[in-house]
Image (tube, rainbow, N blue to C red):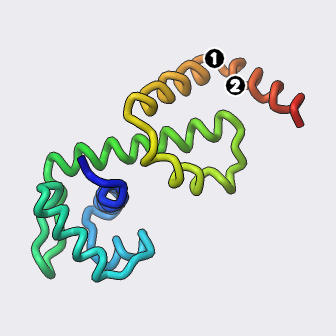
Amino acid sequence: MPTPTMEDYIEQIYLLIESKGYARVSAIAEALQVQPSSVTKMVQKLDKDEYLNYEKYQGLVLTPKGKKIGKRLVYRHELLEQFLRIIGVEEDNIYTDVEGIEHHLSWNSIDRIGDLVQYLEEKKERVEQLRLIQQKDE
């Protein structure tokens, strides 16, 4: 299993490849706000652990294992953002809150949050009822 830091890199690499078709060390460093040398070290580790294939000065490609995990990590992030929006968390807090909790939840918890999001969104009146409860508390 990848560490939380490895997950952040895999997720960002997956997003870059999905949006641009490639991921370069400089773009990863910029997105994660780290030094390129840190990216190079992590990319080498991810290559060794078979999450990606990396050749110096050539760029990198996610392996099937890396793609699978990357896709799941992006799903987790987007699901948690969606969940926090539904329950009424202020938009300015959502990204930071997701970054703070995403690595600390089990996949079982993520799946149950997914079930809850699906349940709430199946009928819009459920979300509306939640909003009414929140308005009473304010």
Determine which quarter of the picture holds residue 96: bottom right
Q: Nearer the viewer, mark 2 or mark 1?
A: 2
Relative depth, front residue between 34 and 59: 34
What amino acid type should be assigned to the residue bearing mark 2? Val
User: On the rendered image, what quadrant is the C terminus found in?
Assistant: top right
Work out whether 27 lies above or below 98. below
**Residue 10 position within the rendered picture, expressed as x and y whole percent measured from the top left:** 29, 57
Dot 1 crowding, Cα within 10 Å, few <14, some 14–19, many 20+: few
Q: Secondary structure at mark 1?
A: loop
How far apart, in angstroms, are the residues tagged by discs 2 and 1? 8 Å
Total marks placed = 2
The residue that disc 1 covers is 123
The residue tagged 2 is 127
User: Tag on residue 134?
Assistant: none
Q: Which quadrant of the structure image shows residue 51?
A: bottom left
Q: Residue at x 27, y 68 (%)?
A: 23
Q: Is residue 4 left or right of residue 40?
A: right
105 over 12 or under it: above or below:
above
The residue drawn where x is 69% and y is 43% is 89
Q: Would you place residue 129 above or below residue 50 in this image?
A: above
Query: Percent position (x, y) of residue 64?
Result: 15, 47
Q: Residue at x 39, y 47 (%)?
A: 74
Q: Pointers 2 and 1 in contact (CB under 8 A)?
A: no
Examine the image and state in which quarter residue 44 appears: bottom left
In-image side of 10 versus 102 (left or right) = left
Q: Is residue 27 left or right of residue 114?
A: left
State the image coordinates of residue 48 (x, y, percent, origin top left): 11, 62
**Where is residue 100 drawn, in percent x and y?**
53, 53
Label 2 sits on a secondary structure element that is helix
Q: Is residue 12 left or right of residue 23?
A: right
Q: Check disc 2: other Cα within 10 Å, few if <14, some if 14-19, many if 20+.
A: some
